Amino acid sequence: GTFQKMFGTWTVMPGIRFDAIDRTIASPARPSTTLRRGYLSPTLHVEHPLTKTINMTLSYSRRTVQPGYEEISPYTVVTGPLAIQQGNPRLRPERTSAYELNLHYSRKSLEVGLILYNRETEDLKSNVYTVNEEGLNVFMPINVGSKIDRGAQFDITSPLFKRVKGTASINLFSSRTPLFPFDDGLYASTFRYTGNATVEWVGKQECKRPGDIVQVQLTYQSPYRDYQF
């Protein structure tokens, strides 16, 4: 549910979201498991022109991702010759709070945009691995802690010559993820950045036939580390 209202040059749209799960898992001659949960998540979007050429948008949202059936089932599932999956009925859903600031500058044919965001995920889901008495690998989903993602995106679009337009974008990504489920003090921190640039030429339109388009694009990705958790 959302509601939008204008206060002068400010546009405000608050909202509320309800997520619920009601699930019973049963098997003959085995105890059943019932899971009932409900969550209220607020949202807020604010838009305001700072000047005639600069527009600002602020956003906040909260989302809940419920676990799947096999993740909460108390019964084991064979996933390979030497591997089984054990569900976790106490597994909590992942809940993410996202904050975003968007600034957009527009004047004639020049477009410039800047986006800053911060996302915090509570009860991040991962797997813990053990070996049982029969020598089988057992993995079970658990909640390991909180993950933080931060980043920025800068875009610019401008004409370069007649029929030639240029576009460039830079993206920054930073994250902090818990390394071990039973130690809140150990995290993996990663940072990377990407960039791309495009030069586009548009030919003349002939009668009703649109002009030809030629694009040259350059993309770059920084080196980064990838961890297996």
Image: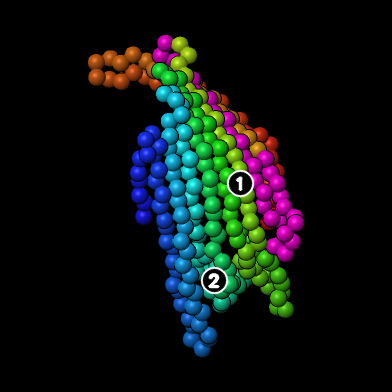
Does residue 91 appear in the picture of this structure? yes
148 relative to 183 in the view: left or right: left
Residue 34 or 19: which is nearer the viewer? 19
Which residue is identified by label 1? 149
Question: What's the CA distance linking mark 1 and mark 2?
Answer: 26 Å
Residue beneath disc 2: 72
Given residues 157 and 20, the one toward you in this image is 20
Q: Residue at x 47, y 57 (%)?
A: 41
What amino acid is labelled 1 in the image?
Asp
Q: In which quadrant of the rendered image does the N terminus lie?
A: bottom left
The magenta region covers 162-191
Q: Residues within 10 Å of mark 2 (few under 14, many from 20)?
A: many
Horizontally, is 207 left or right of 31 in the view? left
Q: Is residue 82 above or below residue 148?
A: below
How far across and down, in percent of the image, does residue 25 sit? 48, 77
Where is residue 122, by image quadrant? bottom right
- Relative to 109, is 60 above or below? below
